[in-house]
Structure formats: C-alpha cells, structure tokens
Image (cartoon, rainbow, N blue to C red):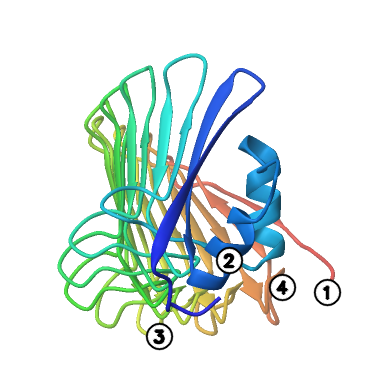
Amino acid sequence: MIRSHTSHIRVTYADGASEIMSVYAVNEDISRELGRHTEKPIGKDLQVWLETKECLLDSSGGPAFVRRFADGTTVEKYYSDGKLHREGGPAFVRHDISGGTVEEYYSNGKRHRENGPAVVWRHADGTMEESYYRDDKKDREDGPAYILRTADGSVGEYYYRDGKLHREGGPAFVRHDISGGTVEEYYRNGKRHREDGPAVVWRHADGTMEESYYRDDKKHREDGPAYILRTADGSVGEYYYRDGKLDRKDGQAIIWRWPDGSTEKEMLSR
C-alpha cells in the first residue's frame, strides 16, 4: 500500500505471555470496507485482515510495533510504509529486564546513520558494542566501524569499508587487553593480507610474541618463515608456509631455536 493513507489503526493482542501492539496505515477505501463489517475483526484477526489488504506498519507519533515480554523486557520498532525507519532516533529499541539496551538506527529499511553508530548495544555487565553502518553495510571513513569495550576494560576495534574488514596504512583489527596484551590484524577487502610485514601480530602480556604473514587470506611468505613464535623464555619457533600450507623449498619447514643455541628441525614432505 502506498503512502496515501488518511488514518492509522492500532491492533493489540496477547501472544502467549507477551503483549503485542501494532499500528497500520490505512486509506479511505480500507477504512470504509472495515466499517461495513457487522462483526469487526479484533486482535490477531484484525492484524491478519489488514495484512491481507496489504496495509503496512507505519509510525504515527510513536512506535509502530511494541512487544512487552512477561519478564518486563520491551521491544519497540518504528516504521514508515512498512520499512524500519525513524528520523532523529533509533528505529529499533530493546530494553532488557537485566538492564541492557539495544538501539539500532534505520533509514528506509537499512541500518544507516550519518553522525554516529547505527547500532549501540549496552550490556548489563558494562560491556558496550558500537557498529557504524552506511546503507546496511559496516562502514566508516574516520575510525573503526565496530568497537567492543568489554566489562574488564579490554577494547577491540574493527575497521570496515563497504561491509568488509579493510584499512589502508594500518591494522583493520586491534585489540588491547586489560592484561597488557595486544593483537593487530591487517586486512584488505575482507582478507588477511599485508605486503610489507606480518599481517597478524599478537603480543602476549607475558612477553610471548606471535607473527603471521598472510597473502590473500593464506599464510605465505617468500623470504622467511610465515609464522614465528617467540616465547617468554627466549625460545623461537619458525614455520614456513606457501599458499596456506607448511612448505619450504630448500630446507626444513619447522625450526625451533632454544635459548642455549641448540635447534630442533622437522622436515615435512611437500
């Protein structure tokens, strides 16, 4: 039904232990047809009748859909001509009885927000998630498109372009743990990839360090080991990969070097 309605009809009914409220836009023809019913449908029957007439959910000064669960949790959705949409506020709002909230911004049925995160999820334990969307795809020009702040103080940042993990000139995923550890991962168009260094660098709080080299989402390195593990005690493990498989043309594919200078080598057949 096109947006040429003259009024709205509110429908309420119980669905198990939940209460449902929906608002539909109706035009004059639908209103007259409904008025001719000697026994007008109500509740769920009215909703079904309106939907068979192709009436659409449509907000009129408030949410077009509200569901109240038995435990006190509520969900509100704002619609325009049947699509999630709201000007100046979130089109989807959820309040959990635990204290958590979810807010999602939509424009014409797509997650989208120009001046802030399109999805904000505040967990009851203090964890917070923020996601930036443009035309229903994770995307942000000037910072991470997804940010996770956990209750313990750890922070994860994810950079997206057009819905894919991607960042020019830096890691597309960065995590800082409260323990002091960090993880950095480089992506290009959704694939782990880096031309001039390791695509994954994991610095553990105890001093252990891991480096992984990737090309087009496969462990690979031409001039050295593609995975290097440096443990806190000074041991070093080197793993050679080509196209995602353990492989070395001219020697051992796995080499361990111990702090005393000794080595342990393992030859893997190609």
State the separation of the CA atoms marked 2 and 3. 63 Å
At label 4, counting other C-alpha atoms closer than 10 Å, the crowd grade (few under 14, some 14-19, many 20 or more) is many
Determine contact: label 4, label 1, CB under 8 Å.
yes
Looking at the image, is mark 4 or mark 1 earlier in the sequence?
Answer: 4
| Residue 66 point in image, percent of width and height | 44, 38
Q: Is residue 34 above or below residue 153?
A: below
User: Could you say whether the residue bearing mark 1 is in a helix, strand or loop?
Assistant: loop
Determine contact: label 3, label 1, CB under 8 Å.
no
At label 1, counting other C-alpha atoms closer than 10 Å, the crowd grade (few under 14, some 14-19, many 20 or more) is few
State the separation of the CA atoms marked 2 and 4. 71 Å
The amino acid beneath tag 1 is Arg
Disc 2 target residue: 30
Looking at the image, is mark 2 or mark 3 earlier in the sequence?
Answer: 2
Front: mark 2 or 4: 2
| Residue 88 point in image, percent of width and height | 17, 61
The amino acid beneath tag 2 is Ile
Determine contact: label 4, label 3, CB under 8 Å.
no
Disc 4 target residue: 247
User: Could you say whether the residue bearing mark 4 is in a helix, strand or loop?
Assistant: loop
Front: mark 2 or 1: 2
Q: In this view, does 261 lie to the left or right of 270?
A: left
Front: mark 2 or 3: 2
Disc 1 target residue: 270
- Residue at 23% of width from left, 31% of height from top? 178
